[in-house]
Amino acid sequence: MNFKINQDFFSFKTLITPKVIQFVYIIFVLVYTLLAILSLILTLINGEFITAILIIILYLPFQILIRLGLELIIVVFEIFDVLKENNRQLSEIKEVLSNKYLQK
């Protein structure tokens, strides 16, 4: 079975992009949160209260937009998986039907 996994991996039947996207999202959330906190602290130290308010207001919408963009990419891969499964099932049905008609 291990050979099958490697064979699927190298023939691009198994896709790693959804896993990479999940990893990138986690890294992005951590880095973006740390940068937002650092920016907030620095703007408050400098007395730029308007900028601090903007950082607070824009933090969540930007996180949501990034999440939605990455989810759209993952949806494309989910569609690919469903189409691949449908193709496999149709191939099996075609084979069964062709064997049935060949026996008559």
Image: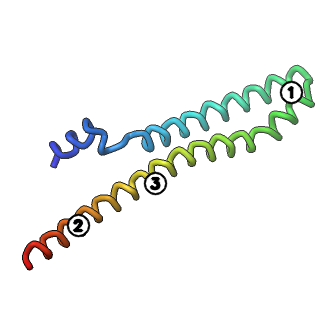
Badge 1 marks a residue whose secondary structure is helix
Q: Where is residue 53 in the image (x, y as percent from the top left)?
A: 87, 36
Please tell me the numbered disc located at residue 44. 1
Foreground residue among 37 and 86: 86
| Structural crowding at the residue carrying mark 3, measured as other residues with C-alpha within 10 Å and reported as few (<14), some (14–19) or many (≥20) | few
Label 3 residue SS: helix
Q: Which amino acid does label 2 sit on?
A: Lys
Q: Quadrant of residue 98?
A: bottom left
Q: In which quarter of the image is the C terminus?
A: bottom left
Name, please, the residue furthest toward the left. 103
> Measuring 23% from the left and 66% from the top, which residue is drawn there?
94
Which of the labelled discs sits on residue 94, or is there none? 2
For the point 88% across and 20% down, the residue is 46
Name the mark nearer the viewer: 3 or 2. 2
Question: Could you tell whether 93 is left or right of 24 in the image?
Answer: left
Q: What residue type is labelled 1?
A: Leu
